[in-house]
Structure formats: structure tokens, C-alpha cells
Amino acid sequence: VTVLPWFIRSTRTLDAWVLENRDAARQTWIDNADLAKSESREKDTAPGGRDVYVPLPIRRGDPVSGIQIMQPAAGDFRGMITKPRTTIQIVGPGGAGKTTLARQLGIWAFENGPHYGIASHPMLPIWVDEELDPAKNSLRDVVRGRLTAALPKAEIDDVLFSALLEKQRLMVFVDRLSERSATTQQHVQTIYRSTRIDLLIVTSRTQHLIDGAPGVKIYPQPLNSGTLLRFMTELLQLFL
């Protein structure tokens, strides 16, 4: 009775499962209609409808005095995802690029390896952009539903799903938390009282106190004369 759950929860089994389903999950991530509903002010699109990511400066820890990263890449986030119960809040005003950065983190989640990417182990990103309720529409249930929809041919029992959540094989995103209902905000802020989600990314216009996981705060920086020129140059190159 105890051997099978142990085998399912082993890191080798989880990595093999993620790798087997990664291509299908990546295609779902790209095609996900929910992404089109993200804040239009934060979305740049190249010809053919391709989403564009141009790295812009961020600060870690404090919006003014925090460590500045001029051109954030996957490796810059690798050190942030080393502890159990990792929570990253991407905080800034509307139009700052929070959702764009979060979506890029999801793309980077597919490109992991021992010496590159966000983590040494493979992960699948799960995007949540809806109201939540612990009784009727919990974050855990929504994540499982999204995973099942993305991988209709995969077998996902409860033991496997719990292990994927608890061992950072799923990168869970909650978008626009500050614009959600008080019930949704409370549910996310207290999620660790009831659910093990060991890798949670939140975008919000304001900071939230997530009980039991102070985590890392990332602040996209406003464009200035220097960064604006680089941004426009790189964006123009994508359209040529």
C-alpha cells in the first residue's frame, strides 16, 4: 500500500512524467485563450500574432532600492526558486509589464536543465486568471482542472497531482490578484494553511501578505530615456 505512492512521488518519476507531457503542455500554454484576456496594455504582438517579450529592468525586494536587474533572463530567477514554498509576487501599476513578465516565466519553465533555465528539474506552468473560493472553486481544484484540460490523454491521480504541486513540478500563476474579489484575495493569502503549492507566482498592483510564505517581490521598473530607446529598438527589430 505504501510502495506505490512512494514510487509516484519520487523525483525521477515526476521528472519523467513532466518530460513526457511537456510538449503538449507547451502547446496549450502558447494557444491558451486565457492569455488573450490578459491586460491589453501589457501585451505586445509581433506580426502573425506572436507574443513578444522584450526584457525591461526589474528590482528585487524593494521598488526603489532593491537589487536592479537590467535585462532579466531565466537565470536571474533560478536562485529565487531554491526553497520549498517559493512565492514570487510581481508588483506594479497597471501597464507596468507584470503579466508579460509572468507569462515569460512560464515559457522559461519549459526550458530547464542542470545548468540553465529557472530550475534544474522540469516544470509545467499553470495559468489562473479567475475568481477563487475555498469552498466552491479552490485554487487547488482550478489548477488540477487546468492541468487536466491541458493534458487530456494523461493520467493524473490525486497522489501524482499532490506530488507535482509539492515538489515544484508545477509553476502556478495567479494573475491580477489585486483586481479580484476579497474572497479570492483571502483564499490566496491563506492558501498555505490548507494546500501545498510549493511554487506560486502572483501578479498584483499591490503587495499581499501571504501567510507562511513571505517570498520574493519583483518590481518592473518604469521606462526612462535609456531603457525606452533600447525597448523601441528591440521591438522594432521583431517587426522587421
Image (tube, rainbow, N blue to C red):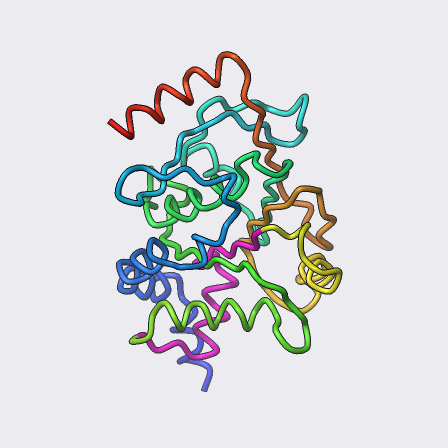
Identify whether 95 is placed above or below 212: above
Q: In the image, is 23 to the left or to the right of 98?
A: left
Residue at image position (50%, 63%) is 165
The x and y percentages for residue 222 are: 58, 25
The x and y percentages for residue 110 are: 34, 50
Image quadrant holding the N terminus, namely: bottom left
Nearest the camera: 39 or 140? 39
Q: Residue 205, located in which quarter of the rendered image?
A: top right
Q: Residue at the bottom extreme?
A: 1
Q: In the image, is 15 to the left or to the right of 128?
A: left
Q: Residue at the top extreme?
A: 225
Q: Residue 5, located in which quarter of the rendered image?
A: bottom left
Magenta-span inclusion, residue 167: yes
Residue at image position (47%, 73%) is 145
Identify whether 116 is placed above or below 157: above
Q: In the image, is 92 to the left or to the right of 47?
A: right
Q: How many marks?
A: 0
The x and y percentages for residue 10 are: 40, 66
Identify whether 37 is placed above or below 218: below
Residue at image position (28%, 38%) is 47
Image quadrant holding the C terminus, namely: top left
Per the rendered image, the range of residues in magenta is 154-175
